[in-house]
Amino acid sequence: MTERPINSILAADFGNVNTRVLLFDVVDGQYRLVAQGMGRTTIGSPTDDAAVGLAGVLREIADSSGRRFFAETGALIQPEQADRVGVDYCLTTASGGLPTRAVLAGLYEGQDIAAARRAIAPFYMDAVAELHLEDGMTSRARLNRLVHSRPQLILITGGTDGGARTVLLELLAVVRQAVALTTAGSRPTVVYAGNSSLIASVREMLAQHVEVLVAPNIRGRGGINLDGAQRVLGGYFDASRRASKSYKQIAAMSDSGIQPSARGIETMTAFFSRQVSGAVLTIDFGSARSLLSLAQGGAVHTLVRSDIGSGHSAAAMLDRIGAAKVSQWLPFHPRRNELAQYVLDKGLRLDSVPLDMRARYIEYALLRAGIRYLLAELRRQTIGLADAPDPARVSLALLAGATITGSGQGALDMMLLADALDCDGVLEVKADPHGALAALGALAAVEPKAVVQLLNNNVLENVGTLIRVAGKGTSGVSAIKVSATMQNGERSQRDVAVGDVWHLPVGAAASVDLRIQARRGFSIGGKRRLRLQLQGGRGGVLFDARLDAMREASTMTERAVNMLRWFAAVTGQDRPVVIPESWLEAPETDN
């Protein structure tokens, strides 16, 4: 806690494309979101100064709110003065800029390197090389790999406190050779988070060549402990941003230091997991980067990819995933180079939106395939770990990024999420339309009361509840019977058949009592009978009994009919579904 009272809080988040600003203030004794704004991030050419974009957004907020932020000298006014002048606290988070090139070094891949990957995940670091005893390389090959990787940071882990020393000293000797061969101005920072009995040796071997930061052993008593290493990595992130031209002015006005946006999101994912006593998944699908953070059973796993995104990284995403993975979510055969041209246009025109149904389906297909790829990568990185998460058992999903939250149709967002996750059971869905998760996570260490009150005052949006059926059955056969009693006493019943979705509108201020009976051969989260009292939201409640309808569609006509019918069901279209003839034409082939 800071010494002076904090009432007004200015939270600025600097992404690769947009700078988001949120203003929190105490109203009637409660923290609330009172103003917000967004503008282009000014990192890189021509200004390469994030403060320029921030100033533009704050001018717009000042015009709409009447609050003045800057003194005549250009400095941010702190603390807040009378007549709504200035703010008490300035909090800054960032994801914009190039990722840090990191080399991970440890004894064993499944223990030390796996823990190191988890440690660096929320700090926008790309592991450009990994060195360990099981990598099959000689010491000379490791030296070459390390030098040619041109790392900005080397994270060294390995061994339990008081454990074996010789093999880790051999690895440290390779690191010493590599940094000694590197030009002085290009040498990396070394973070040591291994066997604590070697700390003196690490300093003796490396400190004359590079900056050495020491963190508590990641492999502490009782298992993996990332907190200490992540505190050190957070300090490195802040220092590296402060030293850059892009963030120099931002650093001067920030009270919090420059914190990674992903770290704040990870903190909030873990917070919600404790609140619901279950698995929570956050998906932030951005233009240049995308993030998954999955918390379950006290552990949190985060994945950040700079080659998966809906704008800057759209072309890289298609190249990484492959056109076939995207095409399987389309109700038509894409024309030759259609997908490649679409992602190229997205990268050039970041504000563009789909202008017709064909483009919209491509956008949704890229989203589904992108999230499925991220989930597969998260599973791959956590396989074999004692605390490996299970995305199929998520009870709450938090959605961020305009691609996944900006359709305007909450039920559609939930259907797309169901396709991407391939989950089963009851899933509550919330959205972060203001981009507040990163700020809330960073604010938790400063003013935790503010975080709780902002959540209670709906800084996040209730999208609704997704109820997904599991089992096997013939299309058209009843899968579940639903009895719904609305808050106003209105009652309805519905049989949801195999291959169908049903959207039950329930407003955000309303609730519904549900009794669900699954037919023989079907279940919801392993149960055949459920009684639920659910709060409404923008998307109400969505019942999904499609099962394997997408995979079992044998022709493009069948797939197109199904997908357009589902789209109509979740968006409330009453008119008959019409399929353009061009969508059913055979795919083009090379002669």
Image (cartoon, grey):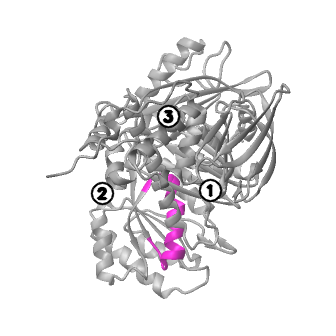
Pointers 2 and 1 in contact (C-beta within 8 Å): no
Q: Give the answer, above or below, for where 563 lies relative to 46.
A: below
Kind of residue sitting beneath label 2: Gly
Residue 161 marker: none
Kind of residue sitting beneath label 3: Ala
For label 2, the residue is 185
Kind of residue sitting beneath label 1: Gly
Q: Nearer the viewer, residue 588 or 216?
A: 588
Badge 1 local density, few (<14 within 10 Å), some, or many (20+)?
some
Q: Is residue 216 left or right of residue 120?
A: right
Which residues are the magenta region? 105-125
Residue 176: % across, % down: 37, 74
Sequence order check: which comes first, mark 2 or mark 1? 2
Sequence order check: which comes first, mark 1 or mark 3? 3
For label 3, the residue is 402
Residue that sits furthest to the left in the current view = 591
Between disc 3 and disc 2, the foreground one is: 3
User: Which residue shows up at 48% across the image and 30% down it?
Assistant: 577
What predominant SS class does the magenta segment belong to?
A: helix
Residue 125: % across, % down: 43, 56
Q: Is residue 157 left or right of residue 126?
A: right
Badge 2 local density, few (<14 within 10 Å), some, or many (20+)?
few
Q: Nearer the viewer, residue 349 or 177?
A: 349
Residue 329: % across, % down: 43, 47
For label 1, the residue is 473
